Image: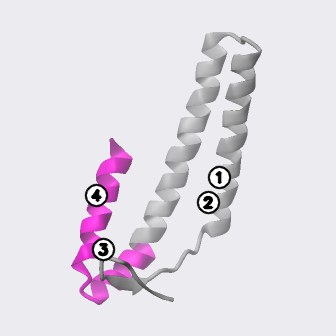
Amino acid sequence: MIIMSEKGHSHTHHHHHTKAVLNRLSRAMGHLESVKRMIEEEKDCSEVLIQLSAVIAALNNTGKVILKDHIEHCIVDAWELGDEKAMENLNKAIDRFIK
């Protein structure tokens, strides 16, 4: 599918790992719910931090899957179309993701 954004660039979006991303997000949400329950139950701070680190890792790994998929498909298509704005947007997204 060709997507034309409000900013005027177009490229093809192929989301090959949608199911895997959704599964990872569900897992991260489960971990986060667990953290919430732990706080409500006044669990040991060390245990909460360990569980919270699982949430952070799950989100980071989800981001890696999305980034890889975006580079391998969307950016390749945009590059072939000469869509320099897509490359600029990728650089901005990477800068924010890696903070």
Q: Dot 4 corresponds to which residue?
A: 92
Report the Cα–Cα distance between label 4 and label 1: 24 Å
* Magenta-colored span: 72-99
**At numbered mark 1, what does the secondary structure look like: helix, strand or loop?**
helix
Q: Earlier in the sequence, mark 4 or mark 2?
A: 2
Report the Cα–Cα distance between label 2 and label 1: 5 Å
Quarter location, residue 93: bottom left
Q: Nearer the viewer, mark 4 or mark 1?
A: 4
Q: Dot 1 corresponds to which residue?
A: 24
Identify the amino acid type marked 2.
Val
Q: Dot 2 corresponds to which residue?
A: 21
Report the Cα–Cα distance between label 1 and label 3: 26 Å
**At numbered mark 4, what does the secondary structure look like: helix, strand or loop?**
helix
Q: Nearer the viewer, mark 3 or mark 2?
A: 3
Quarter location, residue 16: bottom right
Magenta run includes residue 19: no
The residue lying toward the viewer, choosing from 6 and 46, is 6
Q: Dot 3 corresponds to which residue?
A: 86
Count residues near mark 3 (Cα–Cα under 10 Å), then give few for <14, some for 14-19, many for 20+.
some
